Amino acid sequence: MSTIITVYSHDAFKSFLLPAINDADHSILLSESLFNTSKDIELKLEIRDGRWFFVFSEDYDIEYLTSDEDCYIKSLKEDVADGNNEGSIIFSM
């Protein structure tokens, strides 16, 4: 099954298809010019046992809009099943 992450800002909307790999790291480049941010951000992810997870970074923090849960603990699939399918990325300056 494919996993798609959609990122949007006031200026852009883009979907990223995550690769069909296992036990590996992957990143998505959120371009400063496309998303009108203060800098490029490398959104880090990893897949373990067929499940995608966000990876902590000093460059940003991810927070869910509908919950106070920690988005780094559960897989993306588990979070979506729990209704946590929309979040915000807070950039570190």
Image (tube, rainbow, N blue to C red):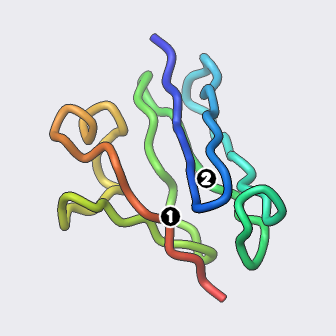
Is residue 41 shown above or below 84? below
Residue located 51% across and 16% down the image: 2
Q: Which mark, residue 76?
A: none
Q: Mark 1 — residue?
A: 56
Q: Position of residue 88 (x, y in %)?
A: 43, 63
Residue pushed farthest front? 11
| Residue nearest the viewer, comparing 48 with 67 | 67
Q: Residues within 10 Å of mark 2 (few under 14, many from 20)?
A: some
Callout 1 touching callout 2 (CB < 8 Å): yes
Q: Residue type at mark 1?
A: Phe
Q: Residue type at mark 2?
A: Lys
Is residue 93 shown above or below 34? below
Residue located 20% across and 58% down the image: 66
Q: Position of residue 29 (x, y in %)?
A: 75, 51
Task: Report whether 51 appears left or right of 25.
Answer: left
Q: Which mark, residue 44?
A: 2
